[in-house]
């Protein structure tokens, strides 16, 4: 499945959240990640984030797409982490 993850965490935990998300997804821009991920790895990611986050201060939003058939990605302005496709 394809996932877009967005987080808003206290600055004390930003580095940990960034490091954890980068293990599973591609960093797109500040606090935004995307990529293909399996159910098992998504579960691991969510468990790791739950351990470090404080529910009263932090939030994570996950958008899950089973298919990208009807989707298109468009960037306006500077692309912070351009994805290069290697064939």
Image (cartoon, rainbow, N blue to C red):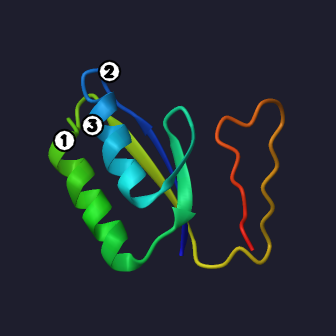
Going from N to C along the chain, the mark reached first, 3 or 2, is: 2
The residue sitting at 20% across, 35% down in the picture is 54
Which numbered marker is on residue 16?
3
Q: Position of residue 75 (x, y in %)?
A: 80, 42
Measure the C-alpha gap from mark 2 to mark 1: 12 Å
Going from N to C along the chain, the mark reached first, 2 or 1, is: 2
Q: In the rendered picture of this protein, how many numbered marks are placed on residues?
A: 3
Q: Position of residue 24 (x, y in %)?
A: 40, 60
Can residue 48 be seen here? The reply is: yes
Which numbered marker is on residue 11?
2
The residue sitting at 29% across, 69% down in the picture is 43
Question: What SS does tag 2 mark?
Answer: loop
Which numbered marker is on residue 52?
1
Going from N to C along the chain, the mark reached first, 1 or 3, is: 3
Which numbered marker is on residue 5?
none
Viewer-nearest residue: 82 or 62: 82
Residue 17 falls in image quadrant: top left
């Amino acid at each position: 499945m394809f996932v877009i993850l967005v987080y808003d965490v206290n600055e004390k935990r930003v580095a940990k959240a960034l490091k954890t998300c980068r293990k599973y997804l591609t960093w797109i821009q500040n606090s935004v990640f995307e990529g293909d991920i399996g159910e098992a790895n998504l579960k691991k990611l969510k468990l790791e984030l739950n351990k470090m986050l404080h529910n009263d201060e932090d939030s994570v939003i996950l958008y899950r797409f089973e298919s990208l058939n009807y989707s298109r990605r468009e960037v306006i302005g500077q692309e912070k982490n351009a994805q290069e496709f290697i064939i």
